[in-house]
């Protein structure tokens, strides 16, 4: 994207969190209880695997960690 100013990066990530309806969480163990946080943690890395990973596939792959969210998707 060519963005190098740290303040702009913070503003962009805050906007993305607002769009996704998630809050900024500092403790990773708390964040990993919500699949949205866990998905974003994986997606922040670059590479072929993360580029092609969809939220639906992420939930399907990690259904043992987030069973209630997988059930909601199948309804």
Image: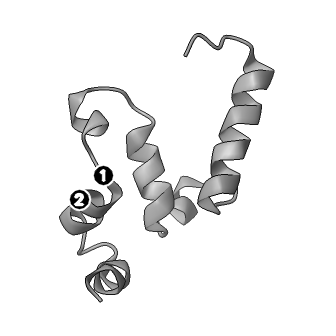
Residue carrying label 1: 54
Crowding at dot 2, Cα within 10 Å, few <14 / some 14-19 / many 20+, comes out as few
**From what the image shows, is residue 8 above or below residue 3?**
below
60 sits to left or right of 16: left
Relative placement, left or right, of 74 versus 17 is left
Point 76% across, 34% down: residue: 11
Please state the horizontal and vertical placement of residue 72, each as a whole percent of the image: 36, 85
Mark 1 closeness class: few <14, some 14–19, many ≥20 residues within 10 Å = few
The residue closer to the viewer here, 27 or 50, is: 50
Q: Secondary structure at mark 1?
A: loop
Q: Within the image, what quadrant is residue 74 found in?
A: bottom left
Instruction: Judge by depth and name the residue closer to the eye, 2 or 7.
Output: 2
Determine the residue positioned at 69% across, 26% down. Answer: 9
Q: Position of residue 18 (x, y in %)?
A: 70, 54
SS at circle 2: helix
Q: How many marks?
A: 2
Q: Report the residue marked by disc 2.
A: 57
- Are the two marked residues, 2 and 1, in contact with CB atoms closer than 8 angstroms? yes
């Amino acid at each position: 994207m060519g963005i190098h100013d740290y303040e702009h990066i913070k503003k962009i990530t805050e906007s993305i969190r607002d769009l996704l309806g998630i809050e900024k969480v500092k403790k990773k163990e708390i964040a990993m209880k919500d699949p949205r946080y866990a998905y974003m943690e994986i997606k922040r890395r670059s590479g072929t695997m993360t580029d092609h990973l969809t939220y639906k596939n992420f939930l399907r792959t990690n259904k043992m960690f987030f069973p209630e969210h997988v059930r909601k998707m199948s309804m």
